[in-house]
Amino acid sequence: MTKVIIDAGTSWSKILEISSKENFTSILLSANKNLHQYKIQEPQTFYDKDDKKYFGNLFLIPSTLAATLPVEFDNATGHMVKKRVKPNGLYENEVISLAYGAKKLIKSLKDATIVDIGSRDLKWVQFINGKYKDLDWNSSCGSVTGATVDMLCKFYNVDPNNISVQAEKIPVVCGVFAMEKIMDDISKNTPADIAIAKYLHGIAYNTWKFAKKPQKMYLSGGFCNNNCFIETLKLYCDVIPLGRYVLLGGLF
């Protein structure tokens, strides 16, 4: 039996299609052959919470495309798909998915703070002695952080891979309020890549502070692919990137 599992983000959705059979017919590729370009092209085996082995396809697709897929999901997280879960399926809170996914990845999890930064919000969960201790979720002060970085880089034609850490930070509350400060900076002849790096410093500082200033942070989400953000965050704590599929891993 094939299962389709989704972590539906605001900008990007992560979808996993798994089966106990190695050679299975893909429901997703049958529904939309264009999804082939969004498939993560690596040999894929996955293990559930009971260490049962599955074979599968992993996709990273625009959420606008995910919304058009004519499928219902077996397991899901993310408010955008709450009404698209099968009647006997599982819909999970995003922070719970983050916690379960982190436990699967961090085998020796004892004392740990795991932070997920998406396009629109910021959430974290803390474990002490291997047990849940605390969590928080901020959709206001974490507002559109990732989306703002994407938009700025595209607008100013800046390659996010070529942004260097800046000692100065733009003191931002959220991406919406930061936009004006960034554009003011650029209008005063600050190069766009430096202004964006200063904004990334502001996000990094806010992230560390919001997560109660941990000495070590396990990072989840799209910012795991942003080297400038990671290196800036290291000014405040040790950082271990877990990738952008942590919530997805917490759903099965």
Image (cartoon, helix red, strand yellow):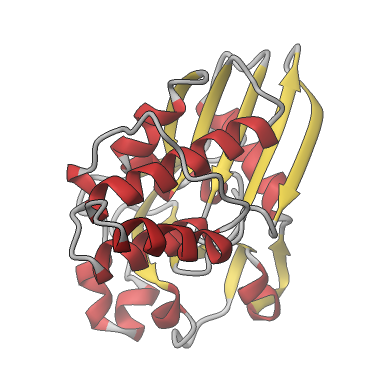
Q: Is residue 14 visible?
A: no
> Where in the figure is residue 101, as x and y percent of width and height?
58, 39
> Where in the figure is residue 78, as x and y percent of width and height?
63, 65
Comparing 195 with 106, the one in front is: 195
- The total of numbered circles placed on residues is 0
> As drawn, which residue projects farthest toward the front?
188
Residue 201 found in image quarter: top left
Comparing 128 with 251, the one in front is: 128
Residue at screen point 48% across, 45% down: 170
Q: Is residue 156 visible?
A: yes
Residue at screen point 38% across, 28% down: 167
> Where in the figure is residue 224, as x and y percent of width and height?
39, 40
Residue at screen point 44% across, 33% down: 242
116 left or right, relative to 99? left
Residue at screen point 66% across, 45% down: 123
| Relative height, residue 28 to residue 173 (above, below) | below
